[in-house]
Image (spheres, grey):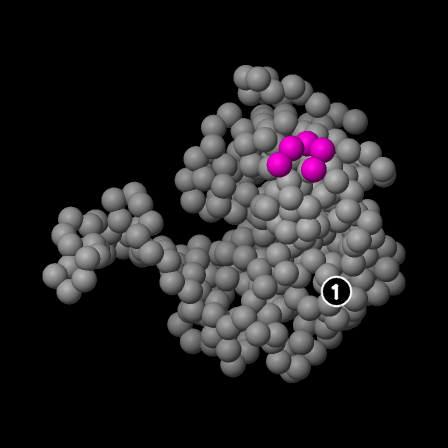
Amino acid sequence: MDYNKIPDNFVGKRILIIGDIILDHFVWGKAERISPEAPVPIVDVQYETFLLGGAGNVANNIASLGGQATLCGIIGTGHKADIICSLFNEKKIDITGVFHDTRPTTVKTRVVANHQQIVRFDKELRDTIGAKSMRSITGYIASNINNFDGVIVSDYKKGVITPQLIRFLMVQADAAGGLFVAVDPKVGHFHCYKGVSLITPNKKEAAEGSSVTINDTKSLEKAGQKLMRDLKCKAVLITRAEEGMTLFCDKEIHHIPTAAKKVFDVTGAGDTVIAAFTLAHVSGATLTEAAVIANHAAGIVVGEVGTATTTVEQIKNSLTAPPPRGATAI
C-alpha cells in the first residue's frame, strides 16, 4: 500500500475516546529573586495558558488529523470546567459523552520561569468515580457505540478506567461488529486491559506491566510477547523514545526506527501515537502500516516544545522525506 494515501482517509473517521480528562494549566514568568521566606525562587507571573490534557489531548490529536473526535468521561463544575469546555468547543470536539461530577476537574498546573519548570502541582481525585457517573458513561457507550469506527481508551489512573468498564466496553465493541479498541495504558492498571485490540506502553510501562526488566533487544521482545500472552490482545506497540518503537502482532516483531529528526520534548507524544495509529488502522492500514504512520506522527510532535499535535499534511511530508541519518527505512 502507498503509505501516503492512508492519511487522506482519516477525514471523517469517527473515534470515541474514553478516559481521564485533564486540564493542563501553565503559569509563565521570570525568576530573578530568591524568597526571603524560604530558599525558593520568586516567580513574577507574566501570563497563563490552558491546554487539553489526558484523554482531551488524544481527542485534540484526532481532530487535528481530520477525524471526528467524541470524548467520554467526567469533569467537575465551576471555572475550570468552563475553561475546558471552551477548549473542546474551539477544537470542535464532541463532548456529548462528558458528564459533570461533584469531584473537581483534574488540573495539572506547571509553573515555568526562565524556560524551566519550577514546580508542578495537581488538583485531582484518583479514587474510582461514583456509581452515578459510571452509569452515565456506560449508558452513553451502549447507546452510541454503533456510531463509531474505533475506540481509544486513555487511562491516566484518575478513576474512570476499571476492569469492569473495559469488560463492558469490549462486549459493546464486539456487538458493534468487532470495533478496534486501542488503550494507552497506565502502570498498575495492566490487569484492566484483557482482550483489547492494542496497547501502546512506553518502554518503562512495558517493563513494569510485564514484570520484565528491559535492558536490551532480547528483554524488550520478551516483555512484549509476555504482554501479548497475558492480555490476549491483538497487538502491542512499545514506544521507545529516540529508539523508535516495536510492534508485536501476528506472532511477528517489527522494530521501527525513529522518524524524528530532532527531539525537544516528548510531552504528549503517546497521545499522538495512539491517535495516528487508530485513525490509520480504521482507514484501511494494516497494523504494521499503522505503526509506521504513528511513528512518523510522533517524530513530528517530539520536535516541538510542549504538548503538540500534527496534521495529515505534515505526516505525508514526513513519509516521503529521507530517513534521519543513521536510521533504516522500513
Residue at coordinates 74% horizontally, 64% vertically from top-left? 166
- Magenta: main secondary structure equals helix
> Which of the 4 image quarters holds residue 327?
top right
The residue segment tinted magenta is: 215-219
Q: Nearer the viewer, residue 255 or 102?
A: 255
Residue at coordinates 80% horizontally, 62% vertically from top-left? 170
Tell how many labels: 1
Q: Is residue 216 magenta?
A: yes
Q: Nearer the viewer, residue 305 or 120?
A: 120
Image quadrant for the N terminus? top right
* Residue 250 screen position, x and y as percent: 85, 38
Q: Is residue 138 magenta?
A: no
The reply, left or right, for residue 225 in relation to residue 86 is right
Helix, strand or loop at mark 1: helix
Decide: few, some or many residues near mark 1? Use Cα within 10 Å; few <14, some 14-19, many ≥20: some
Residue that carries the numbered disc 1 in the rendered image? 166
> Which of the 4 image quarters holds residue 159?
bottom right
Residue at coordinates 54% horizontally, 39% vertically from top-left? 310
Question: Can residue 243 be seen here?
Answer: yes
Looking at the image, is 317 positioned above or below residue 98? Answer: above
* Residue 16 screen position, x and y as percent: 68, 58
